[in-house]
Image: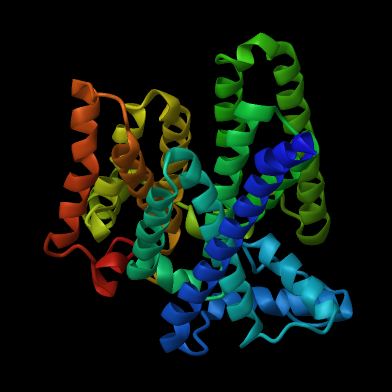
Amino acid sequence: MAGLRDAWTRFVLPCAAARAEGAIALAASIALFAWASAPAARWLVDDAAISYVYGMNLGQDGQLAPNLEGTAVEGFSNPLTVAVVAILSAAHAFHPLTTHRTIDAIVFGLAGWIAFRLLRDVASMKWVAWLGLVIFLGLEVCTPATMIWYGSGLENGQLTLGILALLWRLRAVTTAGFSPAIDAALLAAVALTRPEAPLFSLVWVVVAGILASEPPLAATRRSQFRGLLATAAITLLLLTIGAIARYALFACLLPNTYYAKVGGVDLRRNYLEYVRPLLGNYWCAFGFSGCVVALHATAHLRRLALALVSFSGAALALPLLAGGDWMGHHRFATAFLMLGHFSFAAACCAAWTERRRPSTIMAIARVVPAAAALFLFASGRASSFTASTSASR
């Protein structure tokens, strides 16, 4: 009887508490999104409607084309969104003006739930993790460049959820090893969210390989390498099948967006005229991203810091290649802004829960979140629609 009571106390109660915390984080995130997006009513970007037409035609009539019995032309850049719409349309559960709001709310809720799980590992006290979640979600909702696109019906929210899920799986890899089937399915799904998303999957494989070679996982390096190799092989197989299907349908291997958005690349011009002056001033994105320094100063958080730095670099690839999108409000940079917000929240959690006597480096690192917060009060923190589109003209 004593053993049963001990097992209940050690295993059952903590699991129940963790599930309850997760449910609260999920429900609170969905409620926050519903409240913040309510003024937008039936806000929907016309580009999202294009993807919806493809998905509805595929789900209801089996034709992946913009017009029934018309020419098969790839006019979308988010295959995952098209697939979700096709499945819902086949079940007669999709309406182009209303269903996307439910999907967007669920996606935002899952992103908040995963963010809380990650912050819970950073913070040694529960209330600090909850405060970190409030900071992260607050920045996401109060930043137009993230909130506008999360509720637009486009794939931005899905990419945010996918990146956070990749961070979560990196944590699992460092504790329990690879799960090739699960990891490959996630990597393939993230790669299908938008044209540059395969870069995040590639970065994940590289970072996972680096982390798997470090102690204590180095003791099982051979099995870790086999797991990583199996994950990469299955992911490559899935993406190859997708590329073959694209070629069979549209007679091209690369998404049409590569030809429409990335022609005549001028990295220097895009950096000097868009990334540094406009994206850099938008809620001081680089100030928030710089908070990863505080994570590097804490030994057990350096793995998370490495992942955040790597993903942040990947998130700047499309802004550097394509510049500012004509729609404005940094549609191509929501992933970078989100990673900056999460870095700021994680750095606050790390700084507030460090129990040991701080070293000089840690003392400096603790100042980083506070210094980044000062950027919130800088003039011109949110560039206007006109300014954010000037670089694309």
Q: Left or right: 212 with respect to 245?
A: left
- Foreground of the two, 304 or 67: 304
Picture coordinates of residue 353, whole percent (x, y): 34, 38
Quadrant location of residue 154?
bottom right
Q: Is residue 82 left or right of residue 117?
A: right
Q: Position of residue 99 (x, y in %)?
A: 66, 82
Q: Residue furthest right?
A: 62
Report if residue 155 is visible in the image. Answer: no
Q: Position of residue 9 (x, y in %)?
A: 66, 42
- Is residue 355 in view? yes
Indicate the quadrant containing the C terminus: top left, top right, bottom left or bottom right: bottom left
Q: Residue furthest left?
A: 379
Give residue 50's quadrant in the image.
Answer: bottom right
Residue in the image at 61% along x and 88% along y? 97
> On screen, 59 above or below 120?
below
Residue found at x 69% / y 27% = 177
Q: Nearer the viewer, residue 7 or 338?
A: 7
User: According to the image, what is the colour scheme of the structure?
Assistant: rainbow
- Residue at the image point whose x is 51% and y is 79% from the top: 45
- Seen at 22% across and 21% down, the residue is 359
Q: Position of residue 170 (x, y in %)?
A: 59, 35
